[in-house]
Amino acid sequence: MHNDTGELVAALDIGGTKIAGALVDGAGRLLARARRATPADGDAATVMGAVAEVLGELLADGRRPRVRAVGIGSAGPVNAAEGTVSPVNVPGWRGFPLVAEVGRLTAGLPVVLVGDGVAMTAAEHWQGAARGRANALCLVVSTGVGGGLVLSGRLHPGPTGNAGHIGHISVDLDGDLCPCGARGCVERIASGPNIARRALETGWRPGPDGDASAAAVAAAARAGDRAALASFARAAQALAAGIAATATLVEIEVAVIGGGVAGAGEVLFAPLRERLRDYATLSFASGVEVLPARLGSDAGLVGAAAAAADACGLWETAGPGGRRH
């Protein structure tokens, strides 16, 4: 259900390789798109220049009067309370005042910033696998492991827009040092690069094409390679422990998993569901379902729009149990 006033949100999905933008309507449709490569080695102004080009393209086609807000999902860390971003893979942006800069470019439209994991969560709750679920954790498993929460039918970004960041729950007390500074984080075990690293360390070898990605490890696992299977099993165990911890803490009913590594399919999901039974043992946590995400590469844009609409009271994005607009 959505309104019919034609209100649009300009959505931005900002990562280390691309800056994508779209105009999104109240049914979650992407009506116009724009995209630039992220000038990740550039200074702050150069990166902002690419954002300005994307916004300029979106707002130049006569739909500008219908645009009511701007939603931004950005690689983190983000600080929604301050309106700043410091994406790990964009060194030119450290504490960069993105909300203020975008507000300046759009003549004072409301600008809502969330982390990319929270954006994906907003998308899956509004239009995807978590639709109609009042309490959910959504995970993005790719180069890193991010996430977000829906609690009591509402997106729960937290004060800085990072709530639900399951990648940095420690699941191995004396485990490997994570780049974040802690030990044994879910991300240090379950991200794509770490799945590939562990497979290589335990005897898996890439094929003649030299592809050493997690997708190549997944293909080898499907073909029965023991090191590849073991690396995915270890990633699944880490994810299961993190999901169980979350279910125990806030009583989620579903965990939705997206991102490139989720493309491995049952190589990941089968051991994950199996190991979840080992960790989610209490009655109120044991029923948590694990589902693949539905929205794919557009989740960041759809979710950035949903988060902005939710914050500004534009459309009914909350779903059953949530606030009605």
Image: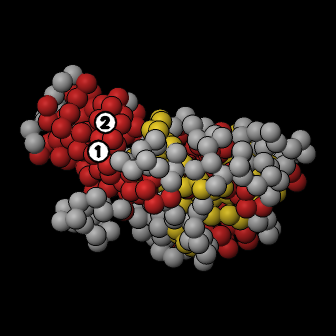
Packing grade of label 2 (10 A; few <14, some 14-19, many >=20) is some
Q: Quadrant of residue 236?
A: top left
- Image quadrant in which the N terminus is located: top right
Residue 274 - label? 2
Q: Nearer the viewer, residue 2 or 170?
A: 170
Residue 102 in picture, x, y percent from top left: 68, 66
Residue 51 at least partly seen: no
Q: Nearer the viewer, residue 36 or 218?
A: 218
Residue 162 in picture, x, y percent from top left: 51, 65
Packing grade of label 1 (10 A; few <14, some 14-19, many >=20) is few
Residue 132 at least partly seen: yes
**Residue contact between numbered discs 2 and 1, judged by CB atoms under 8 Å:** yes
Identify the residue position indicated by label 1 in the image: 278
Q: Residue at x 64, y 55 (%)?
A: 152
Name the amino acid, label 2.
Glu
Q: Residue at x 26, y 52 (%)?
A: 189
Badge 2 marks a residue whose secondary structure is helix
Q: Nearer the viewer, residue 45 or 155?
A: 155
Q: Residue at x 84, y 49 (%)?
A: 7
The CA span between labels 2 and 1 is 7 Å
Residue 97 in picture, x, y percent from top left: 60, 75
